[in-house]
Image (cartoon, helix red, strand yellow):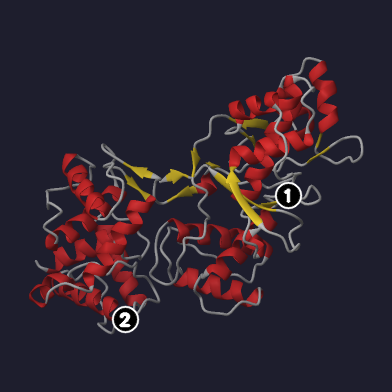
């Protein structure tokens, strides 16, 4: 499990006007955007502490817009506008002040947060002369700086004593939260876990949405039912699947009910941003994520001579690294020996394609392979039927298992049997069949 802290983006897409104005977008380096806004809104003659406090607010405001996907969730194809009426004052091709640029270079990957929250804080501000607001006064920071206050003390003066700065945040590609594919019954991973988290929070304001009790990153019947009710409430096609339109609607409503783009935000705690898969899995790591990687690598290596099939366990060791680097080399990934989310997604994609292309002489072996989708109550089809056939063989010698009907429907009886196996063999007792439980059931069926 890993906390997904916000990263500072390499780039930001700016709409040159108000949101609905028919004008163009430009994509520029994030640091150039901050330089431009700071030079458009601040006076280079202001004290250093004043400039730094203001630049922190400019960075954090932009980061809040990006992190909450404020405009994409409303159907726009940009991250922020150039209009100070809606966002911050961006003037295309304007002069950049040297001392402001030096400060931006120093702190562009720092942003404001609230204590026990991780999202970039919505640092509302105004100039303090022509306009006033509940947030920071830009001209007011000058007086505070002249009193000897530090940038953080200035920020706390306006935003409260629980205001903090996250220093030296990592910089990376600005990848939108939408994973680029439809999530539905059988899907798994961090996107599913995000859907489950968001819907469970939204239901506090919309109690007709059923609670997802098992929010573990596997798209089960509970999740499908919650998605259908959400789609019904917000006038979306009732499919039970999360496509791009449903994803961004969930994102918009979640941001709204938690007021993540508001001065008085409920906030996002580290626990709420803890996801199933780490950003990086590397040498020495242990646990279920490593076992998943081994399962998929070994299955691919069975037919692919370019990838060595080596002995593995639950530890990311030399054998893991050798197999992984061979996989990365063959499929055009950076050969790092480290599993990122990109590696994980491609690993599963290659595995899924291989399932459909195994030679007929390996039919028996293929029948034993995990179908690359989680099975749970409400699932149906040939994959469920295959699993039930393995389960039936276990039931014939282990009378403590409740039983199974081989009908291709993951019904209540199948779920009870799965939970009993999970209890007996120290799995999480959630009634969900993932690759490791599937592997265990296949092994047990051969006794």
Note whether 184 is above or below 40 in the view shown.
below
Mark 2 residue crowding within 10 angstroms, few (<14) / some (14–19) / many (20+): few
Location of residue 291 in the rendering, given as x and y in whole percent from the top left corner: 25, 51
State the residue lying farthest toward the top.
Answer: 148
Residue 393, quarter of picture: bottom left
Question: Residue drawn at (41%, 63%), measured in percent from left and top?
Answer: 218
- The reply to whether callout 2 and callout 1 are in contact (CB within 8 Å) is no
For label 2, the residue is 381
Location of residue 261 in the rendering, given as x and y in whole percent from the top left corner: 70, 50
Location of residue 37 in the rendering, given as x and y in whole percent from the top left corner: 72, 39
Question: Residue drawn at (49%, 62%), measured in percent from left and top?
Answer: 213
The C terminus lies in quadrant: bottom left
Note whether 233 is above or below 37 in the view shown.
below
Q: How many marks?
A: 2
Note whether 9 is above or below 303 in the view shown.
above
| Nearer to me, 348 or 157 | 348
Note whether 179 is above or below 239 in the view shown.
above
Task: Choose mark 2 or mark 1, whichever is in front.
Answer: 1
| Nearer to me, 315 or 99 | 99
Q: Is any atom of residue 210 visible in this view?
A: no
> Regarding mark 2 in the picture, which secondary structure is present there?
loop
Compute the Cα span from label 2 to label 1. Answer: 51 Å
Mark 1 residue crowding within 10 angstroms, few (<14) / some (14–19) / many (20+): many
Mark 2 or mark 1, which has the lower sequence index?
Answer: 1
Residue 126, quarter of picture: top right
Q: Which mark is residue 82?
A: 1
């Amino acid at each position: 499990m890993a906390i997904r802290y916000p990263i500072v983006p390499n780039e930001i897409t700016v709409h040159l006007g108000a949101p609905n104005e028919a004008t163009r977008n430009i994509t520029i380096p994030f640091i150039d955007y901050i330089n431009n806004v700071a030079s458009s809104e601040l006076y280079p003659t202001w004290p250093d502490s004043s400039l730094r406090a203001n630049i922190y607010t400019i960075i954090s405001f932009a980061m809040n817009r990006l992190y909450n996907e404020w405009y994409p969730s409303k159907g726009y194809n940009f991250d922020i506008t150039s209009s100070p009426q809606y966002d911050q004052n961006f003037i295309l091709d304007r002069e950049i002040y040297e001392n402001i640029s030096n400060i931006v270079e120093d702190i562009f990957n720092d942003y404001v947060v609230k204590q026990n929250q991780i999202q970039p804080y919505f640092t509302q501000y105004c100039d303090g002369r022509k306009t006033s607001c509940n947030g920071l006064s830009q001209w007011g920071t000058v007086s505070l700086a002249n009193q000897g206050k530090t940038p953080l003390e200035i920020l706390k003066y306006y935003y409260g004593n629980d205001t903090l700065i996250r220093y030296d945040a990592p910089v990376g590609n600005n990848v939108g939260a939408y994973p680029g594919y439809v999530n539905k019954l059988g899907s798994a991973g961090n996107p599913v876990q995000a859907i489950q988290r968001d819907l469970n929070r939204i239901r506090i304001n919309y109690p007709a949405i059923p609670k997802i009790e098992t929010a573990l990153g596997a798209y089960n019947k509970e999740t499908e039912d919650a998605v259908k009710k959400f789609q019904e409430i917000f006038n979306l096609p009732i499919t039970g699947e999360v496509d791009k339109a449903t994803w961004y609607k969930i994102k918009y409503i979640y941001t709204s009910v938690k007021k993540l783009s508001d001065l008085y935000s409920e906030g996002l705690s580290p626990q709420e941003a803890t996801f199933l898969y780490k950003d990086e899995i590397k040498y020495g790591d242990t646990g279920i994520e490593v076992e998943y990687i081994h399962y998929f690598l070994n299955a691919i290596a069975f037919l692919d001579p370019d990838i060595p099939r080596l002995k593995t366990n639950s530890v990311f060791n030399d054998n893991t690294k050798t197999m992984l680097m061979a996989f990365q080399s063959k499929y055009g990934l950076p050969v790092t020996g480290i599993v990122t989310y990109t590696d994980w997604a491609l690993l599963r994609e290659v595995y899924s394609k291989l399932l459909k292309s195994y030679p007929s002489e390996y039919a028996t072996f293929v029948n034993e392979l995990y179908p690359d989708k989680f099975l749970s109550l409400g699932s149906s089809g040939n994959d469920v039927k295959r699993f039930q056939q393995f389960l039936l063989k276990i039931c014939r010698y282990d009378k403590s298992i409740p039983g199974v009907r081989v009908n291709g429907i993951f019904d209540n009886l199948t779920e009870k049997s799965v939970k009993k196996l999970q209890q007996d063999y120290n799995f999480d007792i959630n009634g969900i069949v993932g690759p490791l439980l599937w592997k265990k059931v296949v092994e047990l069926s051969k006794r």
